[in-house]
Image (tube, rainbow, N blue to C red):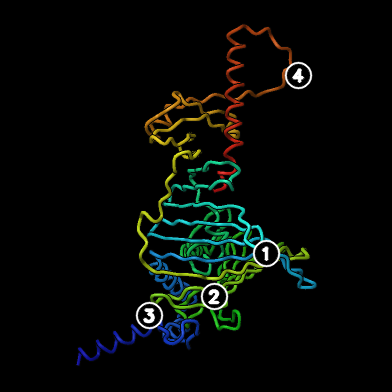
């Protein structure tokens, strides 16, 4: 008898917690299942925690995946509906645990004229990027190493509906699950607000999770019949006075290896006073769960690449023999130039960075603003050396500033 009672309890708990799995055609939305019924009976706070648990489960199922998605950006006149092609992009993205990588090709015409090609990755602390010639304005590759994740992971808003990446104020990029988790921790803050309600998104019954954190407000829509996958976002800049609005809608989905993924997503954004708004259409070409290795998310700089390392504050050119030609690097914000002690090295690491010398750029009032004492020859020599270094660093900076965007 005790065994029977225990079996019944386990069955009920399983029905309450495990989301219903849909069968049938990939793009068909199934009827609501156990997850949809179980959340209705929970207190408000526990409803949010339930949704967070579902987002976490989804994120775990997408620890290893890859996709190819095409994006087309068009400006649409609010009054007439007239459309103007702006640009297109093809993105290949891979994720391997905490590391992710993308290859992006940007087109400047509907006919497919290429404007830029670059790769970028992120390992949780350092980002590597590489821009390909001739689209970087030179005949060599531009490499970057930075302490900040490339914002293309969130500008490409297909990733929001996927739940993989969303951008918060101050340029912070996190998963949607981490965004919700952090919001639950701060729901009592004066500048913060969190609400959950039933509603409809694109004709689909959904739960709307509203989160306001100055200066942005978002409503994340989740479909309980498809394992609480994200089906849309409503966003606005400002609260009392709204300066810009956006709607992100899933219009088609399919199941891949048991996981619901977006197949087509439409994003509309614009300033409230603008005569046009921007429309982004994301179309999935390929999605694979599993199969990605650590090598698939690496970025290697080929011979001839000019690299700016903003983490160690050094610059260098990769030589064919595996060595590196060190270059001066200007820090205009700090008004200094980092100068290598030797022209060539066998490796680039922390010891290399320590070998660079820091030279201050000239500052203060101009010569005509104050009387200039007669300069001795050592002073004239130091002045000339500083000027030469500054000019060299400026040349490096001008040559590599486009690479810094990769």
- Mark 2 falls on what kind of element? strand
Residue on which disc 3 sits: 17
Neighbor class of circle 1 (other Cα within 10 Å; few <14, some 14-19, many 20+) is few
Neighbor class of circle 2 (other Cα within 10 Å; few <14, some 14-19, many 20+) is many
- Mark 1 falls on what kind of element? loop
Residue on which disc 2 sits: 231
Q: Position of residue 37 (x, y in %)?
A: 45, 86
Q: Position of residue 322 (x, y in %)?
A: 38, 36
Residue on which disc 1 sits: 239
Quadrant showing the N terminus: bottom left
Neighbor class of circle 4 (other Cα within 10 Å; few <14, some 14-19, many 20+) is few
From mark 2 to mark 1, how far is it between C-alphas?
A: 23 Å
Q: Earlier in the sequence, mark 1 or mark 4?
A: 1
Please tell me in which quadrant of the rendered image residue 112 appears: bottom right
Neighbor class of circle 3 (other Cα within 10 Å; few <14, some 14-19, many 20+) is some
Observer-nearest residue: 373 or 78?
A: 78
- For the residues labelled 4 and 3, say whether their Cβ atoms are less than 8 Å apart: no
The residue at the point 47 percent across, 78 percent down is: 254
The residue at the point 38 percent across, 64 percent down is: 64
Q: Nearer the viewer, mark 2 or mark 1?
A: 2
């Amino acid at each position: 008898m005790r065994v029977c009672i225990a079996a019944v309890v386990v069955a009920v708990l399983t029905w309450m917690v495990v989301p219903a799995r849909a069968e049938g055609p990939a793009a068909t939305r199934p009827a609501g299942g156990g997850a949809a019924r179980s959340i209705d009976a929970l207190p408000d706070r526990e409803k949010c925690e339930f949704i967070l648990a579902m987002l976490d489960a989804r994120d775990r199922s997408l620890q290893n995946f890859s996709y190819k998605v095409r994006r087309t950006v068009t400006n649409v006149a609010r009054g007439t509906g007239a459309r103007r092609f702006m640009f297109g992009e093809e993105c290949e993205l891979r994720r391997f645990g905490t590391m992710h990588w993308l290859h992006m090709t940007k087109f400047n015409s509907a006919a497919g004229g290429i404007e830029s090609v670059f790769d970028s990755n992120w390992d949780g602390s350092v980002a590597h990027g590489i821009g390909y010639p001739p689209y970087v304005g030179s005949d060599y590759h531009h490499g970057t190493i930075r302490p900040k994740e490339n914002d293309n992971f969130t500008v490409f808003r297909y990733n929001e509906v996927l739940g993989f990446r969303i951008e918060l104020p101050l340029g912070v990029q996190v998963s949607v699950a981490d965004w919700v988790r952090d919001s639950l921790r701060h729901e009592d803050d004066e500048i913060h607000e969190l609400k959950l309600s039933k509603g409809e998104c694109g004709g689909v019954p959904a739960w709307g999770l509203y989160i306001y954190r100055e200066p942005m407000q978002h409503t994340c829509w989740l479909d309980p019949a498809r394992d609480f996958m994200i089906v849309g976002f409503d966003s606005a800049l400002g609260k009392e006075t709204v300066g810009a609005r956006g709607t992100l809608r899933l219009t088609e989905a399919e199941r891949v290896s048991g996981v619901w993924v977006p197949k087509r997503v439409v994003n509309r954004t614009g300033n409230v006073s603008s005569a046009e708004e921007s429309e982004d259409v994301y179309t999935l070409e390929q999605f694979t769960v599993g199969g990605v290795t650590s090598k698939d998310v690496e970025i290697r700089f080929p011979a001839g690449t000019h690299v700016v390392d903003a983490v160690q504050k050094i610059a260098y050119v990769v030589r064919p023999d595996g060595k590196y030609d060190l270059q001066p690097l200007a820090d205009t914000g700090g008004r200094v130039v980092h100068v290598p002690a030797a022209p060539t090295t066998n490796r680039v690491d922390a010891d290399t960075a320590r070998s660079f010398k820091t030279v201050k750029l000239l500052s203060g009032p101009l010569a005509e603003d104050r009387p200039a004492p007669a300069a001795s020859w050592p002073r004239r020599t130091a002045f000339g050396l500083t000027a030469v270094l500054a000019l060299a660093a400026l040349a490096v900076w001008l040559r590599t500033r486009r690479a810094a965007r990769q």
